[in-house]
Amino acid sequence: MLYTGRTLKRLRLFAGMKQSHVAELLQVTQTTVSRWEAGILTPSERQQRALERLFAKVPSTADAALKRLVETSTARVHLICDHSHRLLAASSARRMEWRRDLLGAPMFRYASEDIRKAEGDLAELGWHEARIASLVVETGPNGRDDVPIVAGRVLWERIPLADGATGRLVTTLM
């Protein structure tokens, strides 16, 4: 893929990277990256392949917007990968409940028994086939101090992601 300057800049910004960091990873100068983005220079074939590898995992515009919406929400909300349960994003209200940074961590190990039961019922309800798009789940406490879950209710919502995977938006309702 031949990156235009505008595309390269957009991908770099979505990835949250500075020109100097891209330059360091590709073993070029920051000025070179700046010239690529301005359309003054074109990356070599080798540099194009390196850019493709570097930006292969950059989320789509829609996914980046979803992440920003979750992170800036005032509600107690987080987004996980529906398959792996890895944390993709969390609001500041949710992060304050937790005693450590969990971005990218699998969250199922912190689930209460009620959440585990609800997870086990998803197949029967048609969750994975998208027969239902949302579900209210009663949660009991998980008894943990580091990532506490208290008794209450949460809303699970299926969210399609750009790569074909499904996310689960988890919002505390209580």
Image: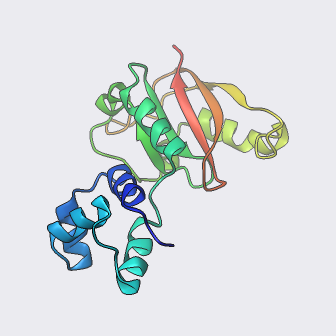
Of residue 58 and residue 123, the one placed in the foreground of this image is: 58
Q: Is residue 113 visible?
A: no
Q: Residue furthest bottom?
A: 46
Q: Residue at coordinates 19% horizontally, 73% vertically from top-left?
A: 24
Q: Residue furthest top?
A: 174
User: In the picture shown, does residue 42 fall above or below 59?
Assistant: below
Q: Residue at coordinates 32% horizontally, 35% vertically from top-left?
A: 98
User: In the picture shown, does residue 91 fall above or below 159?
Assistant: above
- Residue 30 location in percent, x, y? 16, 67
Of residue 93 and residue 42, the one placed in the foreground of this image is: 42
Q: How is the image coloured?
A: rainbow
Horizontal relation, residue 28 to residue 134: left or right:
left
Q: Residue 153's image quarter?
A: top right
- Residue 16 location in percent, x, y? 30, 51
Horizontal relation, residue 30 to residue 9: left or right:
left
Total numbered labels placed on residues in the image: 0
Q: Residue at coordinates 27% horizontally, 38% vertically from top-left?
A: 99
Q: Residue furthest front?
A: 40
User: In the picture shown, does residue 113 fall above or below 152?
Assistant: below
Q: Is residue 158 visible?
A: yes
User: In the picture shown, does residue 38 fall above or below 157?
Assistant: below
Q: Residue 34's image quarter?
A: bottom left
Horizontal relation, residue 78 to residue 39: left or right:
right
Q: Residue at coordinates 15% horizontally, 73% vertically from top-left?
A: 29
- Residue 2 location in percent, x, y? 47, 72
- Residue 171 location in percent, x, y? 52, 25
Of residue 26 and residue 128, the one placed in the foreground of this image is: 26
Of residue 141 and residue 102, the one placed in the foreground of this image is: 102
